[in-house]
Amino acid sequence: MIHILEEAPNHIGAREALLDQSFGLDRHLKTSERLREGRLPAFAYSALDDDERLVGTVRLWSIADEAGSPSLMLGPIAVEKGLQGQRIGDRLMRHALHQVAHAGNGSIVLVGDYAYYARFGFAQGLLDQATLPGPLERDRFLGIEFVPGHLAALKGCLNGTGAIDPAAIQHVDPEFMQVFKTV
């Protein structure tokens, strides 16, 4: 049986290994990665088997357009190769979509295969006025709205927002780091 739960710190090593296996070691070069750099995910879920072994992962990141209008960026999502086809990815997606909608978010964007993501309600052509910081195949730039018109209102280059990952900060002023010690 597979259990979907919030990602925990002890999932990090297994998650990173799964993502390397799924997307290759050059996965950090992708345009979507520019929005995730140095940030913590807004939502992160793990799929664990009965032995508490991580077999799937999905994360969503806070982003905003040039005017500060918020959205979320989904990705990456991955399932262990030997378990693909068992609908673990579907369960992860449905869980994430439910949680995001329940939290009151207006939309989610992603860069991915339309044939796969269409079954979850993602559509093409909703982000005509928005772009990403790097190369982008427009037919793979997908979105889903929880608030009608939310995606059409996004304009310009989308950028990462949300909480800074203290582990990703190097050579930072000690006064700045003090903020993280008091939170």
Image (cartoon, helix red, strand yellow):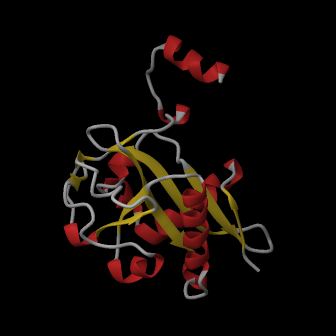
Please tell me how many numbered marks the rendered image carries: 0
Q: Quadrant of the C terminus?
A: top right
At 55% across and 88% down in the image, what residue appears?
Answer: 85
At 21% across and 67% down in the image, what residue appears?
Answer: 137
- Depth check: 20 or 78 in front? 78
Vertical relation: 170 (above or below) 15 = above
Quadrant hosting residue 29: bottom left
Vertical relation: 37 (above or below) 111 = above
Vertical relation: 30 (above or below) 123 = above
Q: Is residue 20 left or right of residue 52?
A: left
Q: Position of residue 68 (x, y in %)?
A: 33, 37
Q: Position of residue 126 (x, y in %)?
A: 27, 65
Q: Position of residue 158 (x, y in %)?
A: 29, 47
Vertical relation: 113 (above or below) 12 = below
Q: Is residue 15 left or right of residue 3?
A: left
At 62% across and 60% down in the image, what residue appears?
Answer: 45
- Depth check: 24 or 89 in front? 89
Residue that protrudes farthest toward the bottom in the picture: 85
Residue that protrudes farthest toward the front in the picture: 148
Quadrant hosting residue 99: bottom right
Quadrant hosting residue 107: bottom left
Q: Is residue 183 left or right of residue 24?
A: right
- Depth check: 140 or 130 in front? 130
Residue that protrudes farthest toward the top in the picture: 175
- Depth check: 141 or 123 in front? 123
At 52% across and 36% down in the image, what residue appears?
Answer: 165
Q: Quadrant of the N terminus?
A: bottom right
Q: Position of residue 32 (x, y in %)?
A: 34, 55
